[in-house]
Amino acid sequence: NALQGFSQNRDLPVKINAAALEVRDKDKIATFSGDVRAVQGDTDLRCKTLTVHYDEEQRPGGMKAADPGPAGQQQIRRIEAKGGVVVTQKDQTTNGDSVVFDMSANTVTLIGNVVLTRGQDILRGHKLVVDLTSGTSKIESGSTRSGVEALIQRSEVPILQPRARQELRRGARRLDCVRMARPEERGRQRDQH
């Protein structure tokens, strides 16, 4: 999904544009507000407010800030985006109410009205957790939803782990390990199993 673009672009700087910026240097927090757009490589995030928690020292594996602050190079450790969050990478878009990027855990959690699209395929739920290290995505429904909703167009065929396939048939409240395969990949997938 589009959120994995941040992992693929991890070594690239993050460029952030917004109407306003408030920096609380003692707390190591910068809050961008008003038509926020953050771009890292080919991944684009848009939201109403973006709060960046940072450290002054460089830690291995963290995300680099685009411009050093007054005290020198800064290391982003956590990003929180709220209000109509839209993340786009190539033909994939992920929408939700809020998202938290936890750099130390290397996870992204999107909560509220989650919608993932890839081409014409659509996946809906309440919460999406992406482990950027393993590449595993989990989508769950909220208490008001009957389950995870998926609309798969005929141009692509879902390749699901056997357990995930059974969960979908039962109207699962959570779906793990969904992978989409294009028609030309189907033969290779069958040959490998």
Image: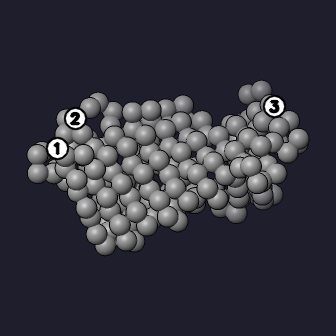
Label whose residue precedes the other's in the sequence (1 or 2): 2
In the image, which is nearer the foreground, mark 3 or mark 1? 1
* The C terminus: image quadrant: top right
> Is 62 or 84 nearer to us in this picture?
84
Label whose residue precedes the other's in the sequence (3 or 1): 1
Identified at 42% across, 51% down, the residue is 80
Identified at 69% across, 44% down, the residue is 140
Label whose residue precedes the other's in the sequence (3 or 2): 2
Residue position marked by numbered label 1 in the rendering? 73
Q: Position of residue 148 (x, y in %)?
A: 76, 49
Residue position marked by numbered label 3 in the rendering? 162
In the image, which is nearer the foreground, mark 3 or mark 2? 2
Give the left or right position of residue 73, taking residue 42 as reference: left
Residue position marked by numbered label 2 in the rendering? 58
- Residue at the limit of the structure toward the right, as seen here: 170
Find the distance from the CA under tag 1 to the CA under tag 2.
7 Å
Find the distance from the CA under tag 3 to the CA under tag 2.
42 Å
SS class of the residue under badge 2?
loop
